[in-house]
Image (cartoon, helix red, strand yellow):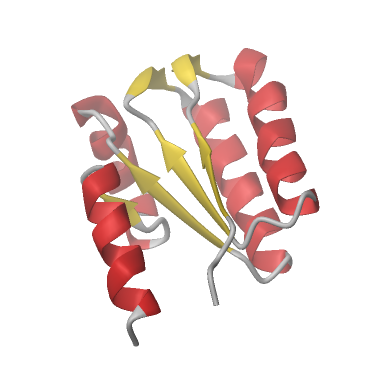
Amino acid sequence: MKSDIRIIEPSGILDGTQGESFRQEVDDAIADGADMVLIDLKNVTFVDSSGLGILVVVLKKVRAAQKEMYFCSINDQVRMLFELTSMDRVFEVLPNRIAFEEKMTSLSSV
């Protein structure tokens, strides 16, 4: 059984201004039947507190839909923010897309 995986790649600063369009992208992915959502943050330069709040909101929506969400390619600022707020224990963070693909391969072979 192959999962429908959607990859979302926000860019620039993830804050309240950009948050609504990002949240809509995740909502659309779930509505379109995605089983998993990968948030690739390689092009995000900064996340502020409102951006972090949006990440929490979309995680709750994804989990409420009984789907999965992963993050990859976070920079040092985002990593520090996740660690300071203990979100690194809540979010499933992988180093990069290759690590995500390896995880999906290992899950599908179980």
x and y percent of residue 6 in the render? Answer: 56, 46
In this rendering, the answer to whether 70 lies above or below 11 is below
At x 64% / y 47%, what residue is drawn?
A: 58
At x 36% / y 65%, what residue is drawn?
A: 104
Please count the marks in the image: 0
x and y percent of residue 34 in the render? Answer: 65, 56
At x 62% / y 66%, what residue is drawn?
A: 67
Quadrant location of the N terminus in the rendered image: bottom right
x and y percent of residue 79 in the render? Answer: 25, 38
Quadrant location of the C terminus in the rendered image: bottom left
Side of 57 where 51 appears, left or right: left
Seen from the viewer's position, the closer of residues 4 and 57 is 4
Side of 75 where 35 appears, left or right: right
- Residue 18 sits in which quadrant? top right
At x 61% / y 36%, what residue is drawn?
A: 54
Side of 109 where 5 appears, left or right: right
Q: Farthest front residue?
A: 1
x and y percent of residue 32 in the render? Answer: 77, 49
- Residue 97 sits in which quadrant? top left
Seen from the viewer's position, the closer of residues 58 and 3 is 3
Seen from the viewer's position, the closer of residues 20 and 2 is 2
Seen from the viewer's position, the closer of residues 29 and 46 is 29
